[in-house]
Amino acid sequence: MQLSTGVDVPEVGVRMGTMAISATASAGSGDTETYRLIRQQILDGVLIPGRALTSSGLAGELGVSRSPVREALSRLELEGLLERTAAGYLVPRRSAEEILEICDARIALDAAAAHASALHASELDLARLAHLLERAERTEDTAGRLALDHEFHLALRAASRNATISRLLDGLETQLAAYDSTSTSAEANLELILEEHRRILDAVRARDAERARLEMTAHQTRARDLRVATLARGEA
């Protein structure tokens, strides 16, 4: 698939993003709190890859009825966080190759978002991005800096004025969340993230769409390589 910016997007990005959109569309009913709790347990690694789940078992663990659990499991299957089995559901194990595919799709989409942001960002968008970068520079705790890293990317995607890219990226990052590693939070990596964000923002401010695309590609490619190296060492 190719975006109007000329960026080739791996098909996995469209598949997973479509699942996330479908899940969002069905989110209006059922016990949202039960859904959020189970979802967070998957993302936090409490429900580890390879674990089998049933609505009755989870209902007992959570102290709720089976109905909201069944709906939550169905929604999480649509998001790609669960796979259906004959006996219930399974928290999927992603191979290194699958994770690499997801990362490559994210690189292409985030690069397209950066390109579009350089063309469409308003002065308010630029001020918001600069503010997030300044906060990240002042923040000392690791969790806060990682959260601001994510907020910077969300703000940049919003500045692209392309809601489809944002939704697709939300779906991809959901797939990757359970495979985050301690390498991401290393001090040296956090400093590199800041420097890369500065270069991206400089390109967007200059309205240099091609440079913004290249800076984002380099940024997310390094993130991909760090994640893959961690997986290869068995540390994820």
Image (cartoon, helix red, strand yellow):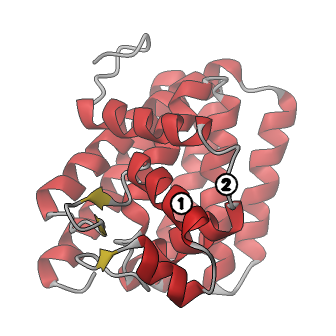
**Label 2 element class:** loop
Callout 2, which amino acid? Gly
Look at the image and tell me whether residue 202 can be seen: no
Q: Would you identify the image quadrant in which residue 95 lies? A: bottom left
Could you tell me which residue is drawn at 43 percent across and 10 percent down?
4
- Looking at the image, is mark 2 or mark 1 earlier in the sequence? 2
**Which residue is more in the foreground, 115 or 107?**
107
Characterize the local packing of mark 1: few (<14), some (14-19) or many (20 or more) Cα atoms within 10 angstroms: many
Mark 1 lies on a secondary structure that is helix
Residue at x 85% of width, y 30% of height: 123
Q: Is residue 96 left or right of residue 57?
A: left
- On residue 213, which mark appears? none
**Which residue occupies the foreground of this view, 219 or 100?**
100
Above or below 37: residue 68: above
At x 66% / y 53%, what residue is drawn?
152
Q: CA distance from mark 2 to mark 1?
A: 8 Å
- At 69% from the left edge and 77% from the top edge, which residue is drawn? 144
Q: Are marks 2 and 1 in contact (CB under 8 Å)?
A: yes
Residue 199 coordinates in the image, percent (x, y): 55, 47
Q: Which mark is residue 30?
A: 2
In the image, which disc is placed on residue 72? 1
Q: Quadrant of residue 131?
A: bottom right
Quadrant for the C terminus in the image: bottom left
Picture quadrant of residue 138: bottom right
Q: Is residue 58 left or right of residue 124?
A: left
Residue 115 is situated, as x and y percent measured from the top left of the image, at 52, 26
When the figure is inspected, residue 153 is found, relative to residue 118, above or below; the finding is: below
* Three-letter amino acid code of the residue under disc 1: Ala
